[in-house]
Amino acid sequence: MPPDDATLRATLSLSALFGGAVWGVYHLATTLLSGQPIHRQDLILAALNVACAMLVGTLVAYFMGPVLVPLIPVEGLRDPHAAGFGLGAVAWEVLPAALNAAKAFAAKRAGGPEGGQ
């Protein structure tokens, strides 16, 4: 699976777009069915969440998908459609943890307050 294969990247990205959409629609449904009064701002934020989940999932699948797919231990999930969908569905949830880990790593490397010096 060469990382420069345009067809592979397109398949991963399109599948991730739909994976992000499914995650976003799930989030939208839980917002609407929460039993609390729903205001316009809640709907706007939920719609933005859907759009961001789709965008982040697509970008992660496009740029990191060819590297991550060979690391998947289950043979059937290495299919570009399944892998892209999975990346799209989880990328928006994993992003905050990845950013925190990157900040901690950078602070440690720089010898900052979290670096122990």
Image (cartoon, rainbow, N blue to C red):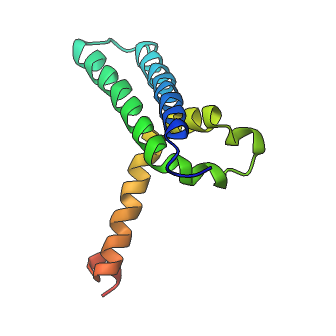
Residue 6 placed where, x, y %? 49, 40
Residue 106 lies in quadrant: bottom left
> Is residue 70 placed above or below 47 in the rendered structure?
below
How many numbered marks, from 0 up? 0
Q: State the residue at coordinates (50%, 24%).
A: 18
Q: Nearer the viewer, residue 100 or 65?
A: 65
Q: State the residue at coordinates (41%, 47%).
A: 95
Q: State the residue at coordinates (48%, 50%).
A: 64
Residue 42 placed where, x, y %? 28, 19
Quadrant showing the C terminus: bottom left
> Is residue 85 placed above or below 69 in the rendered structure?
above
Instruction: Judge left or right: residue 20 versus residue 105.
Output: right
Return the residue found at the far left. Answer: 41
Instruction: Judge left or right: residue 84 versus residue 73.
Output: left
Residue 17 placed where, x, y %? 46, 28
Instruction: Judge left or right: residue 29 versus residue 1.
Output: left
Residue 58 placed where, x, y %? 43, 35
Return the residue found at the far bottom. Answer: 117
Q: Nearer the viewer, residue 21 or 100?
A: 21
> Is residue 110 placed above or below 97 in the rendered structure?
below
Q: State the residue at coordinates (22%, 18%).
A: 41
Q: Nearer the viewer, residue 56 or 79?
A: 79
Q: Nearer the viewer, residue 4 or 104?
A: 4
